[in-house]
Each structure stands twice: as structure tokens, then as C-alpha cells.
């Protein structure tokens, strides 16, 4: 593996780890805290979070890791060697478990929440359903990003061992 490829895998690992941390925070305490608020307060807080999360820094890590994962997957196919499978699996898991789950699971729920009136008569039930469903999808994202991180670390580890072995030969 050349240096550029190792750097790409490192960036994939870093981005996956950062996203795993963000998603873990929401799964482990943010959503629980929001659910403990009065439904109108929880809904408004989450609606605000859903607007403020759409910023350059977050989106560059979230989407950038997806883009770099695609490049790493293509490079792994083109220069297949021991350890390329870790890169393929890490990139695929990140793309499916983070990007796709976000777009098909969490974003539609966020859009539905944005359209809700926190004062509506059924808002408490709808908020409870939202928290349950959104958090389930978020657990998937958390596990996927953590798994991708592990796989990218294994890919880097494998690359180091391959380079060391080649130096000895």
C-alpha cells in the first residue's frame, strides 16, 4: 500500500470515529435527556438541533468520510492485496450504516418532526414515537461507524505489516 492510500484509510478511520462519537452521545444520553423534558420542550430542542447540525464542520466530516470511503473502496479494488477486504468492508459499512441510514431513517423522521406543531393535541404521543424510532436508527449508525472504525484500523495495521514484511524480503 502506498502512502496516499494509507492516509485515505486513516482519514476514513478518523471520520468514522468522530461520527461514532457523535452518534454514541445521542444514543447514550442526549435523546434520554430530551425525552425527559416536557414534550413541547423536547420537540423544540430537537427541532433546533436538527437545524443547527446542518453546518459546514459537521457535514464535512459526515459526508466527507463517505466520499473518502468511496475513493478508498475504489483504490482497494484497483490494488487488491491482503487487507483490502478491511477497507472494502469499512467503507461499505460506513456508507450503508451511516449515510444511507441517515438519509432513509433519521432525516425523514427529522423532516416529520420539523412539520409538527409542538402544541398540537397529539404532540406528546408523536414525540414519544419520534424519540423511540429516531434512537433505534441512531443505534444502527453508532454501531456501523464503530465497526467501520475498527475495520479501517485493521486495514492500516495490515498495511503496516505488509510494508514491514516487504522490507524484510
Image: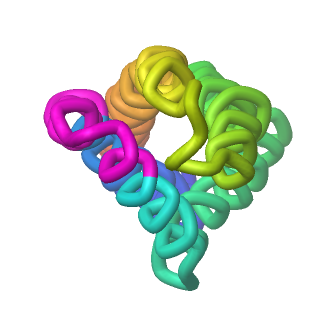
Q: Is residue 33 magenta?
A: yes
Query: How was this image coloured?
Result: rainbow
Q: Is residue 87 left or right of residue 92?
A: left
Judged by its main secondary structure, the magenta piece is helix
Q: Position of residue 110 (x, y in %)?
A: 64, 45
- In the rendered image, which quarter contains the C terminus? top left
Residue 1 seen from this side: yes
Query: Where on the picture, by quarter, is residue 153?
Result: top left
Residue 161 seen from this side: no
Residue for point 20% across, 41% down: 37
Residue for point 43% across, 21% down: 128
Residue for point 67% across, 35% down: 109
Can you say whether 57 is above or below 82 in the image?
below
Total marks drawn? Answer: 0
Q: Is residue 161 magenta?
A: no
Q: Position of residue 87 (x, y in %)?
A: 58, 33
Can you say whether 48 is above or below 104 in the image?
below
Can you say whether 76 is above or below 92 in the image?
below
Q: Position of residue 134 (x, y in %)?
A: 51, 27
First to last magenta residue range? 27-43
Query: Where on the picture, by quarter, is residue 106?
Result: top right
Residue for point 60% across, 26% down: 97
Amino acid at each position: 500500500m502506498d502512502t496516499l492510500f494509507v492516509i485515505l484509510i486513516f482519514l476514513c478511520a478518523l471520520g468514522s470515529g468522530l461520527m461514532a462519537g457523535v452518534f454514541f452521545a445521542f444514543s447514550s444520553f442526549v435523546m434520554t435527556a430530551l425525552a425527559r423534558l416536557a414534550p413541547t420542550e423536547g420537540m423544540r430542542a430537537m427541532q433546533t438541533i436538527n437545524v443547527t447540525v446542518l453546518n459546514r464542520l459537521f457535514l464535512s466530516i459526515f459526508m466527507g468520510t463517505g466520499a473518502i470511503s468511496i475513493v478508498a473502496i475504489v483504490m482497494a479494488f484497483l490494488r487488491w492485496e491482503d487487507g483490502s477486504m478491511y477497507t472494502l468492508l469499512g467503507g461499505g459499512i460506513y456508507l450503508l450504516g451511516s449515510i444511507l441510514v441517515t438519509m432513509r431513517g433519521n432525516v425523514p423522521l427529522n423532516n416529520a418532526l420539523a412539520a409538527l406543531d409542538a402544541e398540537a393535541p397529539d404532540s406528546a404521543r408523536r414525540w414519544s414515537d419520534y424519540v423511540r424510532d429516531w434512537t433505534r436508527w441512531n443505534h444502527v449508525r453508532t454501531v456501523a461507524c464503530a465497526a467501520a472504525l475498527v475495520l479501517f484500523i485493521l486495514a492500516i495495521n495490515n498495511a503496516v505489516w505488509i510494508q514491514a514484511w516487504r522490507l524484510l524480503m
